[in-house]
């Protein structure tokens, strides 16, 4: 029950935020909100961020269920445009989600899931790159913003892809390629192949809110590209900080240091 | 090579490679197994670097700029106090040489190079060392073999690593684990929170990064010899950088009355790696960035371990994780 109430509260916040966004739209173009900037003038996304959305539970519209609060969905097409041949795998994943979701082993979540997984991550930013340190597990992603290209060597099968960013005005556009097929897109078993290609768009709504959009294409799984849109909120709790969560170690950490010895 | 498979391959390489190099000590030949074909050199001496003023480049927030790739110059985590003698039960050829022909103990105080364990703690360390090559219980598996974070201080003797700096932060990207050193002067986490990489609060004194380290879960151990602290340990780290920014010494004072009879000090020398160095598969694993027509620039690749954990290292076995661990 608690999450139903929480969800309603969160949804109200989001709806209010969206209404504010829409109504502020024309004004935004004329008087951009003050946002943090590096000395170079580029937007400075440094800080600790986390989504309030239900995206990680299920990207698609869904009613509340035992393992997920309800949500109207966060994908532009409503549902994901699976190829007919790819849909049965999603259905198998959904049926086995309580044991097969890679997150349950604390494995690297991939992109874009690592961004909307409901735990904080910290962005450290320099002119040359952004470093995303995720609290869950051991995930660290570098988004290069130094005019470098994807590696010449292809098919390296990265868990977090290879991320190359460029600026379009105040929007950071990141092309992410060269994934493996081991990660899921959410807890409900939405998935991708190693042909996944993601284009992210990061931009400030205001100084404490990032609009994050990820356009996903995967010709082996989806009939057409689709876009997930969520907001990232700055964690402003007093003295908030990441607390490492190497949860893959929980199955054996009781053996150390030397707890079995005489 | 698939990136997701890269780490176990490297781990296997190191496991196979360590005795080979050590067997040729004191003048290791080129290591044919190393990625770039460059010689991985283990030095036998520790340079002296004095604390003092920093005259090198500074960042906008005033921090000395020490960003880049670094690695220790002495040995891996085989053996804490006799770093080039090999892991317990796996002595190198160099282990037969007179002690002064190998690198000194990482323990620089007390002068005898030994960790001043209390008797019960010494017995635990020796029990681990005795069982390392044939781990009959889970606790005898060196935690890195399970892809655990290498923690403090072992991260500084496990592969090369990258330092990135930001206003208020020094970030260490290790081969196994990531450590955030906060420079904001705020207090440590509550005492009951214990972490693989501990909780680090630092400040700069001239050429020296001084870090107060608490909240250490102490589970990582210091390496294959089983040396260790308890989760009560307080570590005062001093990263003393030389004037030209090419080397630094890690000097750390360990205080833990539940394990040691007195505080003791460790010293780990490190050197910088740059685009002038080749990928050697251990100290330096920089990959050339794709930027045609521009000068060589090395990049760090993603580090993945637990997802494809395989066997490596001494008698330690890989510990694949197949089932759910968390329910959140």
Image (cartoon, rainbow, N blue to C red):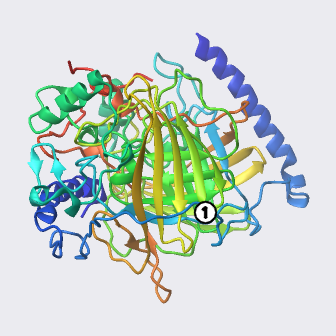
Image coordinates of residue A105 in percent, x first then y, are 34, 32
The image quadrant of residue B122 is top left
Considering every residue shown, the one lying at the far bottom of the view is: B293
Q: Is residue B148 above or below residue A145?
A: above
Image coordinates of residue A158 in percent, x first then y, are 36, 57
Q: Is residue A245 above or below residue A126?
A: above
Q: Note whether residue A76 is visible.
A: no
Q: Quadrant of the C terminus of chain B?
A: top left
Q: Residue at x 24, y 70 (%)?
A: B35
Considering every residue shown, the one lying at the far front of the view is: B111
The kind of secondary structure element at disc 1 is strand
Q: Residue at x 19, y 31 (%)?
A: B126
Q: Is residue B127 left or right of residue A128?
A: left
* Residue placed most toward the observer, B35 or B94: B94
Q: Is residue A252 left or right of residue A131?
A: left
Q: Residue at x 47, y 51 (%)?
A: B251
Circle 1: is it few (<14), some (14-19), or many (20+) Cα within 10 Å? many
* Residue placed most toward the observer, B281 or A33: B281
Q: Is residue B223 above or below residue A92?
A: below
């Amino acid at each position: 029950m608690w999450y139903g109430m929480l969800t309603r509260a969160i949804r109200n916040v989001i709806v209010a935020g969206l209404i504010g966004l829409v109504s502020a739209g024309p004004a935004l173009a004329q008087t951009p909100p003050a946002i943090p900037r590096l000395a170079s003038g580029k937007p400075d996304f440094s800080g600790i961020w986390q989504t309030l959305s239900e995206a990680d539970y299920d990207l698609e519209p869904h009613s509340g269920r035992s393992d997920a609060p309800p949500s109207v969905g966060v994908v532009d097409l409503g549902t994901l445009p699976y190829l007919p041949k790819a849909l049965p795998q999603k259905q198998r994943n959904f049926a086995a989600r309580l044991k097969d979701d890679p997150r349950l082993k604390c494995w690297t979540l991939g992109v874009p899931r690592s961004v909307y997984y409901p735990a904080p991550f910290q962005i450290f930013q320099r002119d040359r790159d952004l470093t995303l340190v995720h609290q869950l597990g051991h995930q660290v992603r570098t988004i290069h913003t130094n005019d470098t290209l994807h590696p010449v060597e292809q098919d390296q099968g990265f868990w977090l892809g290879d991320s190359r960013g460029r600026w379009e005005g105040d929007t950071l556009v990141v092309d992410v390629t060269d994934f493996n097929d081991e990660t899921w897109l959410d807890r409900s078993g939405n998935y991708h192949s190693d042909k996944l290609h993601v284009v992210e768009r990061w931009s400030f709504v205001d100084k404490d809110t990032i609009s994050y959009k990820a356009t996903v294409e995967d010709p082996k799984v989806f009939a057409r590209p689709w876009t997930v849109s969520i907001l990232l909120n700055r964690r402003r709790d007093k003295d908030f900080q990441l607390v490492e969560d190497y949860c893959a170690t929980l199955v054996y950490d009781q053996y150390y240091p030397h707890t079995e010895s005489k | 090579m698939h990136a997701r498979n890269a780490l176990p391959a490297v781990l296997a390489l190191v496991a196979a490679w360590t005795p080979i190099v050590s067997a040729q000590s004191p003048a290791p030949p080129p290591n044919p197994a190393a990625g770039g074909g460059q010689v991985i050199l283990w030095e036998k001496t520790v340079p002296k670097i004095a604390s003092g003023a920093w005259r090198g480049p500074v960042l906008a927030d005033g921090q000395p700029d020490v960003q880049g790739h670094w690695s220790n110059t002495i040995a891996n985590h085989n053996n804490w106090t006799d770093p080039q003698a090999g892991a317990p039960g796996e002595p190198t050829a160099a282990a037969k040489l007179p002690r002064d022909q190998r690198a000194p103990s990482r323990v620089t105080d007390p002068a005898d190079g030994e960790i001043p364990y209390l008797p019960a703690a010494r017995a635990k360390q020796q029990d681990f060392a005795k069982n390392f090559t044939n781990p009959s219980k889970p606790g005898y598996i060196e935690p890195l073999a399970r892809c655990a974070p290498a923690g403090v201080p072992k991260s500084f003797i496990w592969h090369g690593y990258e330092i990135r700096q930001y206003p208020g932060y020094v970030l260490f990207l290790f081969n196994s684990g990531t450590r955030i050193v906060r420079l904001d002067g705020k207090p440590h986490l509550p005492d009951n929170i214990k972490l693989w990489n501990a909780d680090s609060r630092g400040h700069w004194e001239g050429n020296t990064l001084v870090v107060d380290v608490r909240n250490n879960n102490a589970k990582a151990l210091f390496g294959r010899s089983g040396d260790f602290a308890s989760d009560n340990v307080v570590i005062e780290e001093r990263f003393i950088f030389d004037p030209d920014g090419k080397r630094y010494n890690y000097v750390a004072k360990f205080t833990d009355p539940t394990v040691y009879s007195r505080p003791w000090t460790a010293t780990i020398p490190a050197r910088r790696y740059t685009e002038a160095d080749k990928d050697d598969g251990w100290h330096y694993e920089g990959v050339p960035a794709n930027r045609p027509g521009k000068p060589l620039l090395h990049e760090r690749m993603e580090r993945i371990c637990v997802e494809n954990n395989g066997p490596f290292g001494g008698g330690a076995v890989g510990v694949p994780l197949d089932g759910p661990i968390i329910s959140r």
